[in-house]
Image: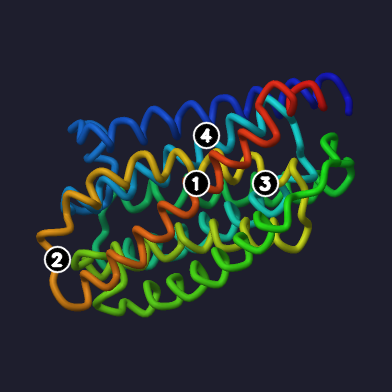
Amino acid sequence: MNNSLYLFLRTALFILASCLLIIGYGFWQRAAWALALWPWPDGPLSYLFISSMLLAEGATMTWVCVTMELNAVRGGSLGFAAMNAGISVFTGYLYGQRHQSLLTAWTIVCGVLAIGALVLFVMGAKYERRDVRPSPPVVRTSFLVFSVALFTATAMLLARRPIVFPWPLKPDSSVMFGFLFLASAIYFFDGWLRPSAANASGQLLGFLVYDIVLIPPYLHHWSKTLGGFRVSLVIYLIVLFWSAALALWFWFKYGLVKHIKNL
C-alpha cells in the first residue's frame, strides 16, 4: 500500500473511531450535548442502546485502525455503508415532512459515511488478510446464528413491529435501530461466509463492548417487563451472555499479544 494512502486511511479510521467512542460515551452518560444529536427525544433505554452500538462500532474500528486488516473488514465496511445509506434516505424523507435542520445534518453526514465505507469495501478486495488463522467452528456457527437473528430483527424493526426490544420503541427509532442492526447482520454474515481470526477479532471485540454496556441495565430491567417484552428480554439476554462468553473464550484462546505478533 502506498505510504501516503496508508497514513490517510489509518488517520481517517482513527478520527472516526474516536468520534464514535466519544459520542457513544456521551450517550452512555446521557450527556446533554450527546442527546441533542439524536433527531428526537427518546427514552433512557433507547439512549443506552444507541450508546452500545456506537461504542461497539468505535471499538471495532479502533481494532481495524491498529491492524489495517482491510480485506477482513470488508463485510463490516459493507454493513456500515448499508446502515448509513438507509439512515441517510430515511432522515432525508423525514426532513421533507418536518424541515428540521438536524435531520439535514443526519442525511448529509450519513450519506458521506456510506460513500466512504463503500470505497473502503472496494479497496479491501485489493489486499490479502494478514492474519490467516482459521476461525474456530464454534465462532463461525455462532456468527451464522447471530446474522439470521439480526436479519430477522432488522425486518421487524423496519416494519415497526411493536415488540422487538424489551421496551416500547418510538416508530422512527424502530426504523433507525433496524438500520443499526442491518450493519451488524451483514458483518456477522461475512464472518460466517469468510471465516478467519482476522474477521472474527474485530467483531467479537465490538460485541463484547456492546455486552458490557447492556447486560447490567437489561438485568435491572427484568422486573419491569411483562408478556412479550419479557420474552424479548430473555432472548436478548441469551444472545448477550452467549456473545460475551464467546468473545472472552476467543480472546483467551487466540490472545491479544499472539494476534498482534501474527500481523
Question: Residues at badges 2 and 1 in contact (C-beta under 8 Å)?
Answer: no
Residue 59: assigned label = 4
Question: Residues at badges 4 and 1 in contact (C-beta under 8 Å)?
Answer: no
Return the x and y of residue 89 as percentages of the image width and height.
46, 64
Residue 262, quarter of picture: top right
Return the x and y of residue 180 as percentages of the image width and height.
45, 57
- Judging from the image, what secondary structure is the residue with disc 1 in? helix
- Judging from the image, what secondary structure is the residue with disc 3 in? helix
Residue position marked by numbered label 3 in the rendering: 200
Q: CA distance from mark 2 to mark 1?
A: 25 Å
Residue type marked 1:
Ala
Q: CA distance from mark 2 to mark 4?
A: 30 Å
157 w.r.t. 65: above or below = below
Circle 4: is it few (<14), some (14-19), or many (20+) Cα within 10 Å? many
Question: Residues at badges 2 and 4 in contact (C-beta under 8 Å)?
Answer: no
Residue type marked 2:
Thr
Q: CA distance from mark 4 to mark 1?
A: 18 Å
Residue position marked by numbered label 1 in the rendering: 245
Q: N-terminal of the two: label 1 or label 3?
A: 3
- Judging from the image, what secondary structure is the residue with disc 4 in? helix
Circle 2: is it few (<14), some (14-19), or many (20+) Cα within 10 Å? some
Query: Mark 4 or mark 1: which is in front?
Result: 1
Residue position marked by numbered label 2 in the rendering: 225
| Residue at 31%, 72% in the rendered image | 164
Residue type marked 4:
Ala
Q: CA distance from mark 2 to mark 3?
A: 33 Å
211 w.r.t. 225: above or below = above
Q: Nearer the viewer, residue 100 or 89?
A: 89
- Judging from the image, what secondary structure is the residue with disc 2 in? loop
| Residue at 29%, 62% in the rendered image | 173
Return the x and y of residue 207 as percentages of the image width and height.
50, 46
